[in-house]
Image (cartoon, helix red, strand yellow):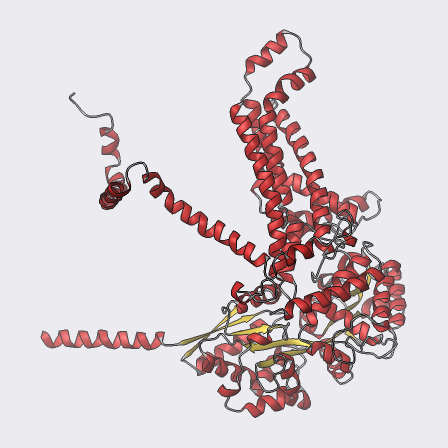
Amino acid sequence: MTGPTPTAPRRDDGAGASDLIAAPLALLSRLIDWPMRAIQRVIGERRMAYVFLLPNLAFFGLFVFVPLIINVVFSVTGGAALFPSQRPYVGAGQYAYLFDCGSFLDPNSCREDHFWRGVSNTARFTLFQVTAMVLFSLVTAVVLNMRIRARGFFRAVYFFPVLLSPVVVALTWKWILQRDGLLNAGITSLGGERILFLVDPSWAMFWIVFVSIWAHMGFYTLILLAGLQAIPADLYEAAEMDATPRWRTFWRITLPLLWPNMIVVIVLALIKGVQTFDEVFVLTGGGPGTATLMVVHYIYETAFSNQVQNFGLAAAASVVLGVVLFALTLAQLAASSRKGAA
Amino acid sequence: MQRKHWISALALLAGLVAGGIAHAQTTVRIAWYSDGNEGEVVSDLLKRFEAQNKDIKVVLDQVPYKAINEALPVQLASGQGPDIARVVDIGGVARYALDLRPYLKDAGYWDKNFGPFLEWMRPQGDTNSIPGFMTQLTVTGPLVNKTLFEQAGIALPGAKATWDDWAKAVKAVATKVQAPFPLAMDRSGHRFFGLAISEGTKVFDAKGEPAVIDDGFKRGAQLVFDWHKSGVMAKELWGSVSGAAYRGANDEFKNAQVVMYVSGSWQIAQFDKTVGNAFDWVAVPSPCGAASCTGMPGGAGLIAIKATKNPEAVAKVMEYLASEPVLSEFYARSLFVPGHLGIAAKGLDYKDASPQAKAALKVFSDQVASLSPVAYKLQGFVSNRIIFNAVISRVGQAISGETTLDEAYKRIASDVEQQIAERNKK
């Protein structure tokens, strides 16, 4: 083979810049080559994978597993001291305190009623939010998948709130919903009575669900849109040739083929719903009363807001929450593997 | 040529030594929150200190109030944190405080001028240490929008008016001028106890242990509950958030939406600046209840922290800030009621204050002498925030309609008992 190699002209164009990057990398690879070969000689080629995984595992262990273990340790201790070594061991005392209830359906009958109010609110919030979120995301994805005018613009518009910080979202809506907010200005200018949206328990729950859907819907719409675009067009063509009604096409083709994506959306939205904190904290502060107090807010308040920072009780509540999230994650993994198999 | 090299080398060495000396400065960090302009004032005063003490560099970290209450205790418990901190929960951080006595030139000055307040800063059982001084003494009480009263053509109730008299008057004014908040009270247990102690609550039993729920407390809680039902108080403060969250009505007062705002003396500088000439406002004496006419004392203390590596430098900074001329200037420019007995006795000239701010400061200063002993005892109680938080959390739930007041009383008692037991667990 004669003449210049295919890469030669590019090399001439930016030789200086690429050398600047390539030279140190080459030096680095030469430097680590010898110790890596030495390790390989000792442990064998098959075990080298663990060596490459080690940095990531160390990072993950330090920032995920170690705090997790510390949290579990805190949950079996009491008192107000910060360091575990100075905290008395109380066994399952914190869990017993959390679960000391006359009836789990009536928070008033529980010793730690705020925790159970948080559980009840989180369950209601998650149920309403996930149902509505999946429904709206599905409708939006179907519409955005059609050949409508300015489709790119609408896709960007629905995704835009996902890019905003939860605090910005909550503050924006707070300004809209407060006594002298934008919405009340509109209502009163039309001759209506001012509504204290964030002071009425039912309205407050409605608005936190609404704002949460508004803020996160774009993300789930995107997942469903990707699923819709993966459905082969010839299936729709065949349905059209058979003069199948549109709703039937949706029911018999779209929905079954989109189902794996729907499962992912449902499980992700469930996990996110259970973890809800920042938006609600800023928008309603858990009020009125405890009408929008969520479990994560309860944990934060128990650990940090009270004069006695009750890390033990907060850690126990975190472990309970962690178990719920673990179960949801397992469900997601099962759903994902079923999707993979499909 | 060789001689030139020697000179250059010596010059370089001298430069390095000088640089080394410059770096030998001791750094003292202060964590500071502000209600008004006191952050600017202390920053100004510290610049003068640094000019006089080249060996000490003072870093003033201006942080939010929430950080002082929530993040600072965790930092201190872990042995980290600033060298000095301005705190409100003085009893709560007492165990992390440094005893300045061995480092002070004249400990007698501190005993003489800060004596009664030092008790608030000491850990239980300690009767001798000097952990810091009060950057302000606060008194809770009402601030009234006088212009709204004038517009409504209703006279301000007199000095011995009761809470009921005020409630009726502010409701009448609000109805006439269509103000949305006839009476606003900070969502704070500290503010509530001014009312409750006036109504006769004793807070402690004969042994000095907390016994929060009694007839006086119930009268106070019932008043707040009824005011929310009758529209004297709007639910936006007490009924809008959960748990121990603080809510103030500063913005609403500034916007002339509040007829009477039960808050305290620390608001004066802020309202003097932000309200300006928009309307006339006055501070009035604490309304009377069945037992007395009292507010709550309080304030922010500047506390030296035990974990500091530079106690001598910390003591030097504290001595400077607590000295009479410096502290007089600080109180006068920040429009604070002095927490220094000598300065309080001499009287303070608030040169920069408007006539209405001066009048308000006088009203609050005059209140200090008539505060109930129960109020002082509660303020000095190391676990007072446990009581304050339990009260706002549970009474807030009753106001929002989630529970009854009777249920709230039971919960307050059990919350206080449980948290104090948790604190005492060893």
Indicate the position of residue A35 as horizontal and vertical percent values.
24, 46
Indicate the position of residue A305 as horizontal and vertical percent values.
64, 62
Quarter-of-image position of residue A164: top right
Going by the picture, which residue comes out furthest to the top?
A242
Q: Is residue B334 visible?
A: yes
Depth check, front residue: B35 or A311: A311
Question: Image point 45% across, 47% down: which residue?
Answer: A60
Quarter-of-image position of residue B128: bottom right
**How many numbered discs, if any?**
0
Question: Image point 65% across, 80% down: which residue?
Answer: B120
Question: Image point 26% across, 36% down: which residue?
Answer: A14
Going by the picture, which residue comes out furthest to the front?
A91
Depth check, front residue: A205 or A53: A53
Depth check, front residue: B300 or B274: B300
Establish if A195 lies above or below B85: above
Establish if B419 lies above or below B367: above
Q: Is residue B142 visible?
A: no
Quadrant in which the C terminus of chain B is drawn: bottom right
Quarter-of-image position of residue B348: bottom right
Indicate the position of residue A284 as horizontal and vertical percent values.
70, 52
Establish if A93 lies above or below B299: above
Going by the picture, which residue comes out furthest to the left?
B1
Indicate the position of residue A183 as horizontal and vertical percent values.
75, 45
Quadrant in which the N terminus of chain B is drawn: bottom left
